[in-house]
Image (tube, coloured by chain):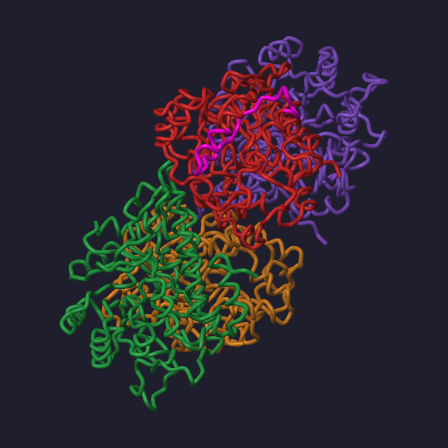
Chain colours: A purple, B orange, C green, D red
Amino acid sequence: MALVCLSDFEAYAKKHLPKAVWEFFAAGADESCTRDENLKAFKRIYFRPRVLRDMSTMDTRTTILGSEISFPVGIAPTGLHSLAWPDGERSTARAAEATNTCYIASTYSTCSVEEIVAAAPAGFRWFQLYIHRKRTLSEQLVRRVEALGFQALVLTADLPYTGKRRDDIRNNFQFLSSIKLKNFEGAFQDEDCSEYGMPPGSIDPSVNWNDISWLQSITCLPLIIKGILTKEDAELAMRHGVQGIIVSNHGGRQLDGVPASIDALVEITAAVQNKVEVYLDGGIRTGSDVLKALALGAKCVFIGRPAIWGLAYKGEEGLRKVLEILKDEFRLSMALAGCSNVSEIGRHLVQHSKL
Amino acid sequence: MALVCLSDFEAYAKKHLPKAVWEFFAAGADESCTRDENLKAFKRIYFRPRVLRDMSTMDTRTTILGSEISFPVGIAPTGLHSLAWPDGERSTARAAEATNTCYIASTYSTCSVEEIVAAAPAGFRWFQLYIHRKRTLSEQLVRRVEALGFQALVLTADLPYTGKRRDDIRNNFQFLSSIKLKNFEGAFQDEDCSEYGMPPGSIDPSVNWNDISWLQSITCLPLIIKGILTKEDAELAMRHGVQGIIVSNHGGRQLDGVPASIDALVEITAAVQNKVEVYLDGGIRTGSDVLKALALGAKCVFIGRPAIWGLAYKGEEGLRKVLEILKDEFRLSMALAGCSNVSEIGRHLVQHSKL
Amino acid sequence: MALVCLSDFEAYAKKHLPKAVWEFFAAGADESCTRDENLKAFKRIYFRPRVLRDMSTMDTRTTILGSEISFPVGIAPTGLHSLAWPDGERSTARAAEATNTCYIASTYSTCSVEEIVAAAPAGFRWFQLYIHRKRTLSEQLVRRVEALGFQALVLTADLPYTGKRRDDIRNNFQFLSSIKLKNFEGAFQDEDCSEYGMPPGSIDPSVNWNDISWLQSITCLPLIIKGILTKEDAELAMRHGVQGIIVSNHGGRQLDGVPASIDALVEITAAVQNKVEVYLDGGIRTGSDVLKALALGAKCVFIGRPAIWGLAYKGEEGLRKVLEILKDEFRLSMALAGCSNVSEIGRHLVQHSKL
Amino acid sequence: MALVCLSDFEAYAKKHLPKAVWEFFAAGADESCTRDENLKAFKRIYFRPRVLRDMSTMDTRTTILGSEISFPVGIAPTGLHSLAWPDGERSTARAAEATNTCYIASTYSTCSVEEIVAAAPAGFRWFQLYIHRKRTLSEQLVRRVEALGFQALVLTADLPYTGKRRDDIRNNFQFLSSIKLKNFEGAFQDEDCSEYGMPPGSIDPSVNWNDISWLQSITCLPLIIKGILTKEDAELAMRHGVQGIIVSNHGGRQLDGVPASIDALVEITAAVQNKVEVYLDGGIRTGSDVLKALALGAKCVFIGRPAIWGLAYKGEEGLRKVLEILKDEFRLSMALAGCSNVSEIGRHLVQHSKL
């Protein structure tokens, strides 16, 4: 059957991935309320479409941190792509490069950052960072990605500890020994790597705003904070000199009970007032979701699980198809809403019955 | 089993039409949220019925653009009626004529406008127009319908491009070669007519408010804009001298995520202040829906899919039955709400918890 | 299985009554939205219960129009009781008498008012009236019930025409020829009595506020208007000198899309300001529903379908059981809410998130 | 299968307990609306989590009435534990002692208070009291628990009569003669003990605020009132010199239609202004529920049915597991919300769309 929309890819992935792998990617924390809310919240936002405008020339391009991308959808950082497709993040990188969009590679990649760059040398990439208890491990990684031409660091801020994903516990989720977190090859020899491929408790729960200065001292890369859900933290981020904010609830995988990211976006863009770029991940399933997020102030959105579904379907080709579908849907939504280019998208385009 | 309400006709049509044909008519865009919302929104509107009024004489007649119709429900423009019943729009025209109501014939008819007029010479008709990239094609069509006695032009404003209807893509929807868009007979010979019977991209996406003047320059017919969902566009329409507005989201087939048409109606009638007539299509399933729309300011409503279901049941006879049921239900709803004629229907009759 | 609550009786009746009879009693108009809303609306009302009050002596008695009843629940007028239990309204009358509450006998009774009185001579009864096109028929009926000791007339105001109940049309609902509207015995000989036992269109749709004076001129009985849903009509009723108002939507059987009666009650008791008594029917299923209605200003409530279910179970005995359950539940709800007698029930007892 | 969250224990208990026993513990009053609302209400409360705070040291300890507990979750008073596990409340006491939290033993225990103390001598315990019609019975019980080192009395205020639990009536719920309310051993010899092990109507429905003084005159123990749902009663409780309030609707087992306890908590903590401690039971299923309750002003929460499920799984071990899961989840929720100790939890942490 033809796969015509992202949920078709979801159905495919659910059917073809091993159960424990599917559940790992699908999992939300605890009761998965926030994971599900991420989708439902988009349905409470209504367009105010304008008609009888010249839509003969459509332009979906935009820029993020000064770089042009073909449309405002990038690849969110998710781990363990080799579980979805043998070639892993190499395929992801190639698909993003081919689509001319941004790929945020994860610390938890199953290909090394060097392999990722080799697979798609011309790609536009950011690197997602968790700060390790052994700071030197993180420092080395930052230096590697800076040297490799990654164009920004994305610090994940919402994971002092890993959220409770019930299915992973039930499945005693362990991936095949053939799959490794390649960025840390050799770092944890003889250690117990049972927590998603790293020694339990590897990520430093003491990380706080003061560590921003440390990061800024070891790299010239722009810094983006991922996982902010309140205006208070958005203001702190700006005060600490970051270049961007990703409004995210980690796909509902960390604290269950936080708002949908699209609901949190509103207060954050109001507070940020365009002083830094604001992005969003969580719940994007159609091109009209992208349009809603941009109307509410996001400069770009990122897809997590849908990218995995694309990989699970056919690796690079599958993910390209996912991205192309989103791009076509986004372009069509723009046209039907009366916007021929991204700069015409604004708050006036939607009505949002707040949480 | 007796068919006693419109949803009985829906069930009949779903059971008897070929799957791809059923899905073509039933389709909404993307996730069909707006299509479904069109119905749900009516349920959020409550009557304030008045009792102990003399309801012995009931009068459901009204006028639209000065012409009397037997009750305020007309036939919305939908295409490809021959897919539902062999005789196609000829049956539609006859049923509307017999019921003494208004039929808006579609550009996408499978009978020519001449055949439609021949089938029901005394019928009251408007013509729905898409503007073709080759303007002469549209101009010729306008001149033909004006000469044939159609009494208004209805310009569809919400389709610079066709919405994404997933089932049509999955079904690779193509109708039988025996079915043609008869209004364009001979126009696209040897061309690929795979987009619902026209060459892909035939409809001009550049159409904008300036084209209203062009239309007004080639015809004396009153002009109605269909597909307006905001007060801003309603005001623009009035400024451009149109005679009427159809509040419509194209049955949820264009931009998914726009409000139900009955929800959009409120702000538009408030803005229009009776300066032009406002109509509505989308979600009408019972006579009480008609009454709610009129209470919120619509002069008349139009039915789309229910007309198709009537045709699918028994052609002209089936559609007449659908119209008669709606008329009886509307009359009864009026009486039970305490209105013996249409002029007594007003905003006081309903409470509407706004979106 | 023990029947412990009203919905157990509903399940019993659904299982044991002939399908068409069940559907006749269960039917709402059109899509039955209002019928279902009648129940759902009670769920949106929350108690503010008070604790640590002396609840050792509970008193559920109240008065309506000056007469004492054992608890504030009476029998609403519903027709055709012989369809539920052979003995028909005789059983109903006996159960009400035994429970010491008020029974509103229906014009559409299958026992004559004389038979009803004979069955339960000491009962407290009102008579529900539809005004017939032949006014003498109604006048005679009024004089009969006044002479028989009925203590009030209840004029149904919301039925200029009968609502559209789809199942009755599908079932071509006709009751056995052995079942007759006994109050009109001999009145319609050789006439077509296909509309629920009366000639079609018997009820006069011209009835209006002026007819109140006529009624008042032919009887000394107090007059109650049933079927009022707006404060405007409540005010008109008071101006026309009625003694009571029953807030009712006819069990959702007339105009579909009107509010739940409990939702309409709020604005009406606010307007009436205790100048006349206000009652309610529609959606009462538990003793706590009764308590909510009284907290919102009703002096008494009436049950329609639950009375039928009781009859269907075991005639008089079944209905007594229904009434006893409701009384026990009401007494318990009062105690748990901190009210030891009816006069302590008031608006402070509930919070109501208005429609 | 591993039991990883409280609802896993629920599923286990439902599967393994005899039907009537399961239904006794699961029952809500009447339609169980409030029982279900207790859970749903938590889902309407959203966190405002703060990120990038040092979460390396987590401390879940708090105090209630001056005593330290390992985390703010205790065991609510529920009766008849021997129905869930042969060892009954002895197991409960041991699990609470091992976890270092507070156990509120019920008047309806199937072990005597002496047996409870003997089973877990070092445990921190309160005693839940119903006041018996024979006051001496209650007085003796109070003196016994005071002598045994229980540290507070919890007076249940919302049960002048027992709520109507339909399943118990249907099941004619009677527990085995081998199971006794041990606190009253010998007290009701030759009496009919068919109401949950006591003579019907044993609990005194006349109990009111004046009885608080009586209780205070016979014991030095701090007094906590359980079952308050309004600010008015919270103020009365403070005026009568109580030391604490448990916001509770008795697990939805008393008056159906009252708000969820978490919804009632808001107005009560606002009224109490920290003058006495406020606790909550009802609907706690995850650690994030605990965090929400504390954010809205509760000093501690208590679990009822989840404790039973733990017992039903494996007695003391099962309940310890339930408590450990809740503690781990609470600690993780705190960390993900940005609170490293309980004192950092406050109203700012949540947004609550009020009832």
Q: Is residue A203 covered in magenta?
A: no
Question: Which residue is drawn at the image coordinates 40% and 20% (left, top)?
Answer: D275
* Front in this rendered view, residue D11 or A40: D11
Asked which quadrant contains residue B243, the reply is bottom left
Q: Give left or right: position of A286 versus B350.
A: right
Please say if B276 is above or below C204: above
Q: Position of residue A61 (x, y in %)?
A: 58, 34
Looking at this view, is C149 or B79 the one in front?
C149
Looking at the image, residue B261 lies above or below residue D148: below
Q: Residue at x 49, y 32 (%)?
A: D129
Which residue of the protein is positioned furthest toward the left in this rendering? C217
Q: Is residue D137 magenta?
A: yes
Residue D92 seen by the camera: yes
Position of residue D336 relative to residue D35, above or below, is above
Image point (48%, 50%), residue name? D30
Q: Position of residue D224 (x, y in %)?
A: 45, 26
Q: Residue furthest bottom?
A: C190
In the image, residue D249 lies at what x, y percent?
A: 47, 38
Quadrant (top left, top right, bottom left, bottom right) of the N terminus of chain A: bottom right
Magenta range:
D118-141
Expressed as whole percent of the image width and height from the top left, the position of residue B310 reads 50, 71
| Number of numbered callouts drawn | 0
Splitting the image into 4 quarters, where does residue B198 fall? bottom right
Residue B142 visible (yes or no)? no
Q: Considering depth in this image, is B124 or C57 the residue closer to the camera?
A: C57
